[in-house]
Image: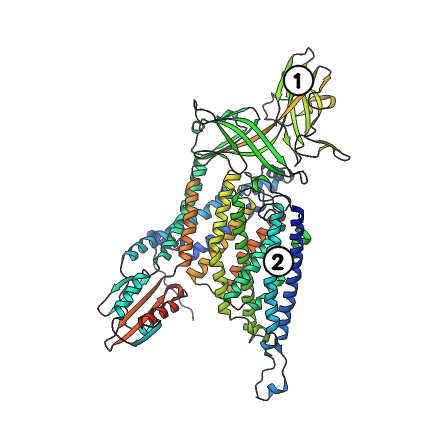
Amino acid sequence: MSQVIELPELGATGLLRYSWRQLTSMRTALILLLMLGVAAIPGSVIPQRDQNLMKVSDYFTNSPTLALWMDRFSLFDVYGSPWFSAIYILLFISLIGCVLPRSVEHFHAARALPPKTPKNLDRMEFYTTWESQGGEIEKAQTLLRSSRFRILQESNSISAEKGFTRETGNLFFHLSLVLILIGVGLGSLFGMRGYAIVNVGERFINVPTTYDSLTFGKLLSEKDLPPFVITVDNFVAKYNTFTNAPEDYTLDVSVVESPGAQPVKRTVKVNSPLRFGNTNVYLQANGYSPIVTVRDSDGNVALQGPVPFLPQDGNLKSIGAIKVPDADPQIGFVATFLPTQGRDSVRGGISVFPEALDPKMLFSIWRGDLGLNTGIPQSVYRIDTSKMERIGLESLKPGESFSYDGGSITFEAYVPWVNLQVVGDPGKNYALLGGIVAILGLLASLFTRRRRIWIRISESGKVEVAGLAKNSAPGLETEIARLVSSLKGEK
Amino acid sequence: MSERWAYISNYSIYSAMAVFTLSFFAHAYETAWAVRAPQSADSTDGNLITKTLDYTRTEKASRIATAMMILGFILLFAGVISRGVSAQRVPWGNMYEFSITGALAFTGAYLAALRKYDLRWLGLLVSIAVLLTLGTAIAVLYRPSAPLVPALKSTWLVIHVSTAIISGGVFLLANVIAGAYLYLDSMERKGPRTVWAQRLPSLEVLDQLSYRLVAFVFPLWTFSVIAGAIWAESAWGRYWGWDPKETWAFITWVAYAAYLHARVTIGWRGRRAAWLCLFAGSTFLFNYIYVNMYGAGKHTYSGL
């Protein structure tokens, strides 16, 4: 038999209320939680722009159409994508909608006395009864008070309750997640992140122009950069002589925190950045800058100084470009720096150790148009040689020079460089606080039990004891047994 | 000096494997021989029982199995410690070291749970799992003992990695128990349990046990993730960056959070809860195996 179910008219408010109830229901929250987990997966498989830009551009080169479609679905920016945001924003709305009413309820419940002793205790769990010897109620009251039960005293019975910490912890745990979200949000709105390569001996001034790359949060501007100056005094890298793996990096700097302040000597390590309030300076990477002098045919200096090279492997074989735009015609050197030179029959010049024990610079010399005036941004480590011709090929050790048709180059020495990462994040302390509260709340809610115990002396002179554990938490049986035995005066 | 300790470590782990193998055989003997074929004396009382369980025959094997498990634990412990001494650091620098420490945590979790529950039936599975882990570690993942790269030189290595390994050990134990639940449940649906399975705890006990293990270790896992975030803040300049390892740690966290909510708030029990538990545990395993071996990202050091 089929039945026609009459649906009541919902109306606009009704529909809103209905949707709100659905959203804040536990089932929806659970589905959203699982969806969040599933939605996080693609970002761990597909390269992400803010982590590995190179791999993302590989996608665009290898299969442009696919990459374009993937980009339309934000698959290269999963964690900032509209669909990922939608899931966690809905989840947090659902969470708040669930937790706030519970908080109010809990606040009232925690201030109220336990409910009255029910009439029929024998229907409760762990019901025990025996002939009264007198004084059980008073005794029970002392015992339960000393184990911090909240007690409602009635004429011939007491009703005791304990374990509110469970719900308190649970609520604090969920609210702390909101705090973490606020911390993350503050960090992305008011944060900044920048990178700068600084040669040993040089200064880093914290203004936008000294950065190689710099990004600001939406609500932060250039004026908000703290005005510190860092001088890189020394950098030492220690490597394991068997595995060639790095063992220690030590960066010595002098720091002037604000204009006019005295410079302070500080040491930076990989796990201990410089900290200026919410802004930290990290030692991120290191490499070598050959110091070169390029002269024209008359012996005038066209270029002098350290040129940072980009490491290519664990032994710090580094590539770089020495560009001399002021020469006429322009000159460029496509160069490789080997900290400890070696030869490989297939790959040619290689580095066999990351420390500069036997350094050498290999280079080819190019003459023509460096293409610096085209307006297209160029890599500082590479030269576009399409409008140039090669006029020489050479390798030099420190202190050696080479003359070519139109000038000369001297490989004077080398100096290490460090890549400083400057990060401002005003939200991280909120996130940390949220994390700590989350753990404490979790411990409180998972390891305390809410339960009630009643004791009554009936008119016929019998003592009745019973209990009730919420969520059928274990342990109440032994607790009551212990109480009963001390009430009976047993040891 | 350090080389000698590295040898001691390797020999301890080989010995531990030998002892775990003995434990495995003792458990297998116990499981198989406790089942007694019908004897003429049994059929006289008119019952239709064809096979019975008789533990008096295998009590000795059972004791040997557990003793071997404890001995293996001690040898493995020695192996992990001497590995640390040889490298003069905590032995959690690469996947080989994670695996031997993980096997140690897994065995430890089993032995600790054994004090409270009769889990000797689980010993067969535990010894196989430990043997497989150690075997893979030695055959595939072995790396010579070496110092740590600078980024790993931090107190947080001890805190973050140890809590992650302990959480992993307990999650896997919960998974084994949830798996046993599903197996026995489908067996019970077809009829009474077969004889060897009769000694295994009831479904309710298994269901509760896997929940308790997860509830117990979930705060520790949360702590491990937060400790990792604090460390990342001081080493990499951000506390969270959706690195593949971080992403999967998050997924595991979310999956177990869903499991706990499903049980506590909605009241899931039994099959559905066990499947969700298995799913959550498998995200942890995936993170450990796939992300370490094939994933890119910042959690890859020294090859593996």
Q: Nearer the viewer, mark 2 or mark 1?
A: 2
Q: Nearer the viewer, residue A177 or A433?
A: A433
Q: Amino acid at mark 2?
A: Leu
Looking at the figure, which quarter contains the N terminus of chain A?
Answer: bottom left
Residue pushed farthest left?
A155
Spot occupied by residue A327 in the image (x, y as percentages of width and height): 65, 15
- Chain letter for mark 1: A
Q: Is residue B49 above or below residue A401?
A: below
Q: Which chain contains the residue that carries disc 2?
A: B
Circle 2: element type: helix
Q: Residue furthest top?
A: A298
Task: Report x, y in % for residue A487.
Answer: 31, 71
Is B18 placed left or right of A114 in the picture? right
User: Disc 1 on helix, strand or loop?
Assistant: strand
The residue at which mark 2 appears reads as B75
Residue shown at 65%/62% (left/top)?
A: B19
Q: Nearer the viewer, residue A36 or A194?
A: A194
Q: Residues within 10 Å of mark 2 (few under 14, many from 20)?
A: many
Any part of residue B144 in sight: no
Q: Which residue is mark 1?
A: A294
**For the residue carrying disc 1, how many other residues have a C-alpha within 10 Å: few (<14), some (14-19), or many (20+)?**
many
User: Which residue appears at 41% of the width and 51% of the height?
Assistant: A440
